[in-house]
Image (cartoon, helix red, strand yellow):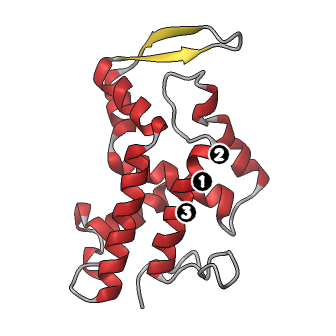
């Protein structure tokens, strides 16, 4: 569910599929700050080793996985599924879900455990879908700045929680 909400936020800012783009388009400073913070999230995601690994698998047709004993092997990947996982909007939506699982007011142990099982650190899957906690910390900080710009999260001076998870458009 949070993955899909991540798509909505991404679409609202970028305007793909003509979804509420007008809420974040225009010359005023708030909208510019939102777009700048949104771009910073995408830049951090694109620069991450996990995203690079997903894109490499989509490009090469195989992924390198490590078994429990530490032995690496090449594994053929499904080309269509790998390309789907490498799409920027899919990367953003998965990252948003991980962000909510770890920093959002809706986080809960079951949700966090599900995200943790998909983390890249283990590299036991040919389809890495989430980021190891240390790698994700910088990405999460970029999400913090995005939601502060959107007015849906209190800044560092205030409580570290969302003001209202349902409110995603600037006021």
Can you identify the residue that label 3 sits on?
Answer: 141
Instruction: State the CA–CA distance, disc 3 to disc 1.
Output: 6 Å
CA distance for labels 2 and 3: 12 Å
Residue 1 appears anywhere in the view = no
Q: Residue at the spot x=49%, y=84% of the render?
A: 151
- Secondary structure under tag 1 reads helix
Above or below: residue 11 compared with residue 32: above
Left-right relation of 18 to 146: left
- Residue 106 in the image: state x and y as whole percent: 68, 65
Q: Nearer the viewer, residue 1 or 169?
A: 169
Task: Kindly indicate whether the residue at mark 1 contacts the one at mark 3 (C-beta within 8 angstroms).
Answer: yes
- Circles 2 and 1: CB atoms closer than 8 Å: yes
Element under disc 3: helix
**Label 3 Cα neighbours within 10 Å, binned few <14 / some 14-19 / many ≥20:** few
* Residue that numbered label 1 is attached to: 137
Q: Which mark is residue 133?
A: 2
Residue 32, relative to residue 79: is it above or below? Answer: below
Residue at the location (26% across, 89% down)? 28
Rendered image quadrant of residue 149 = bottom left
Seen in the image, is 133 located left or right of residue 127? right
Callout 2 secondary element: helix
């Amino acid at each position: 569910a949070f993955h899909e909400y991540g798509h909505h936020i991404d679409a609202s800012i970028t305007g793909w599929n003509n979804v509420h783009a007008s809420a974040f388009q225009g010359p005023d400073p708030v909208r510019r700050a939102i777009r700048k913070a949104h771009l910073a999230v995408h830049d951090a995601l694109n620069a991450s080793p996990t995203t690079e690994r997903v894109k490499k698998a989509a490009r090469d047709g195989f992924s390198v996985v490590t078994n429990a004993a530490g032995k690496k092997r090449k594994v053929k990947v499904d080309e269509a599924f790998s390309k789907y996982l490498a799409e920027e909007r899919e990367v953003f939506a998965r990252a948003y879900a991980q962000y909510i699982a770890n920093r959002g007011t809706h986080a809960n142990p079951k949700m966090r455990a599900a995200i943790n099982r998909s983390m890249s650190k283990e590299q036991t899957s040919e389809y890495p879908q989430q980021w190891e906690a240390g790698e994700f910390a910088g990405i999460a900080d970029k999400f913090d700045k995005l939601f502060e710009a959107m007015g849906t999260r209190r800044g560092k001076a205030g409580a570290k929680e969302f003001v209202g998870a349902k409110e995603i458009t600037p006021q």
